[in-house]
Structure formats: structure tokens, C-alpha cells
């Protein structure tokens, strides 16, 4: 079946460090891929998305490229801030399944 | 402002006492869905609805009911809550399940439920 695997957290970084959160997926077909962010005490917000292979989603300095050959959608940011501390979820959508399939989430802690 | 609202945001109840969590969206979305979030498991879909009077089970529907009598509302009903339903619940909506430009799913702020 379809699934998403994320790296285990927490990921702890110092401010201005480079961030990578790995995400790989298994899907029969061509899913759309998403990164959602959940700040403490809040709901999920869409961070970025990509709907086909080689698309790059970007927002707020975060980027992720849809890599069909490696079935990956890794999240990157060149210089993290304390305000980026949150839980990040990778997810996929297949039109045939009528649902978002989420990874288990990765908590990011950014220290000043 | 386009949004998905949920009520209540926090709820503590006891085993067996029926409760309803409301969800409403103002974006005229056809598709709505409920998820629960548990540590280490991410979010899992409980039920979804493709449109008014059309609902179907997700991955973890046991112990839950839903209804979709109006396009904007999609309440989640726990008729006899149990402690294993203690969780963080999210409602979400989306314009069209067939993808394309309108394929972003919008989430409500969440309802934290504790069943004692």
C-alpha cells in the first residue's frame, strides 16, 4: 500500500544551521507530495507541495524536490531560525485513495 | 477569511458519554475529512466525505460516526467514547478530490480530546 517514511526526530540545530529532513514514499501511481508544519499548540499548515516529478516546492525559505527515481521529497532550508521550531509532516495524496497519507512527523528544535 | 473551524478545542469527558465535535468550512469545499493524531503515528484518517450525504470510512473508523447534511458542516460523533480515543483530532477540507490546482487540503486548529 501507499506509505510515507520520515526520519526520526527530534532534530536539534543551532540558529542559521542547514536543515534536511528526509522523506521517502511508497506509492502505486503518481502521488502529489506535501510538507505540512505544525507549530506548538496549533493545527497543520501547508508549507509546500509538488504535484509531479522534478517539481520543486518552496515557501518561507524551505524547499523540496519531487524525486521519482528515488521516491523522495526531502525538506531543506539553508539557514534555520528559532521560529522554525515545529513538527514537520511529509504527506502524499493519491486521487484513488481520497486521503492524505502522513509520515510520523519530525520535531525540529532550533536553539539560539 | 477562508478557514476550517472546530469546536470545542479542548474536551475532557468520561467513558461512555456521547459527544460531538463540530467542523465547519467556509470555502464551499466538496471534500471533508477527519483525522486523528497520535504520537509516533502521524495523522490517520477516520472518515471522509466527498459531498453532501456521501461519506466513507478511512483507516480507523471504529467507534466514530459522521454525517454530512450540509456542505459546510461535517461533525464527528463519538457515541460511547473510550480511553483509546484520547487523541488530537483534525478536520480538513479540500475543493476537489480529483487533484489539479485545487488540491491543497486545509486543516482546522484541532480538538484535543481526553476520555477518562
Image (cartoon, grey):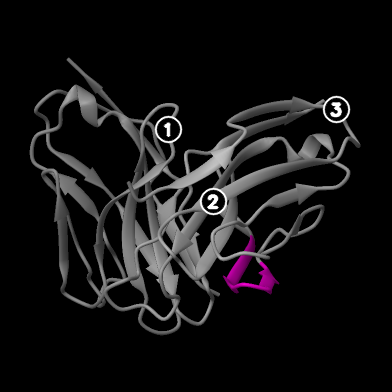
Left or right: A55 with respect to B22?
left
Left or right: B6 with respect to B29?
right
Q: Residues within 10 Å of mark 2 (few under 14, many from 20)?
A: many
Which mark lies nearer to you, 1 or 2?
2
Residue B87, image x and y in percent?
65, 37
Residue at horizontal 62 percent and vertical 72 percent from the top: B52
Q: Residues within 10 Å of mark 1 (few under 14, many from 20)?
A: few
Which residue lies under the disc numbered 2? B24
Residue A40, image x and y in percent?
40, 27
Which residue lies under the disc numbered 3? B14
Mark 3 and mark 2: span between their CA atoms?
25 Å
* Magenta highlight on residue B49: yes
The magenta-colored residue range is B47-57
Which residue lies under the disc numbered 1? A42
Position of residue A65 relative to residue A86, above or below, is below
SS class, disc 1: loop
Residue A64, image x and y in percent?
19, 58
* Magenta highlight on residue A5: no
Amino acid at each position: 500500500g501507499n506509505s510515507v517514511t520520515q526520519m526520526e526526530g527530534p532534530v536539534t540545530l543551532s540558529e542559521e544551521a542547514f536543515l534536511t529532513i528526509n522523506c521517502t514514499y511508497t506509492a502505486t501511481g503518481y502521488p502529489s507530495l506535501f510538507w505540512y508544519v505544525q507549530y506548538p499548540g496549533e493545527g497543520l499548515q501547508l508549507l509546500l507541495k509538488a504535484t509531479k516529478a522534478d517539481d520543486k516546492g518552496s515557501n518561507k525559505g524551505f524547499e523540496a524536490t519531487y524525486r521519482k527515481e528515488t521516491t523522495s521529497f526531502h525538506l531543506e532550508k539553508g539557514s534555520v531560525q528559532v521560529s522554525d521550531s515545529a513538527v514537520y509532516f511529509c504527506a502524499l495524496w493519491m486521487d484513488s485513495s481520497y486521503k492524505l497519507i502522513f509520515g510520523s512527523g519530525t520535531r525540529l528544535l532550533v536553539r539560539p | 477569511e477562508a478557514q476550517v473551524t472546530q469546536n470545542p478545542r479542548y474536551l475532557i469527558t468520561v467513558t461512555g458519554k456521547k459527544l460531538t465535535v463540530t467542523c465547519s468550512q467556509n470555502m464551499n469545499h466538496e471534500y471533508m475529512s477527519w483525522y486523528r493524531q497520535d504520537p509516533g503515528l502521524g495523522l490517520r484518517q477516520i472518515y471522509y466525505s466527498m459531498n453532501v450525504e456521501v461519506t466513507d470510512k478511512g483507516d480507523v473508523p471504529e467507534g466514530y460516526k459522521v454525517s454530512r447534511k450540509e456542505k459546510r458542516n461535517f461533525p464527528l460523533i463519538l457515541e460511547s467514547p473510550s480511553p483509546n480515543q484520547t487523541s488530537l483530532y483534525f478536520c480538513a477540507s479540500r475543493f476537489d478530490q480529483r487533484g489539479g490546482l485545487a488540491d491543497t487540503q486545509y486543516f482546522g486548529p484541532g480538538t484535543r480530546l481526553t476520555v477518562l
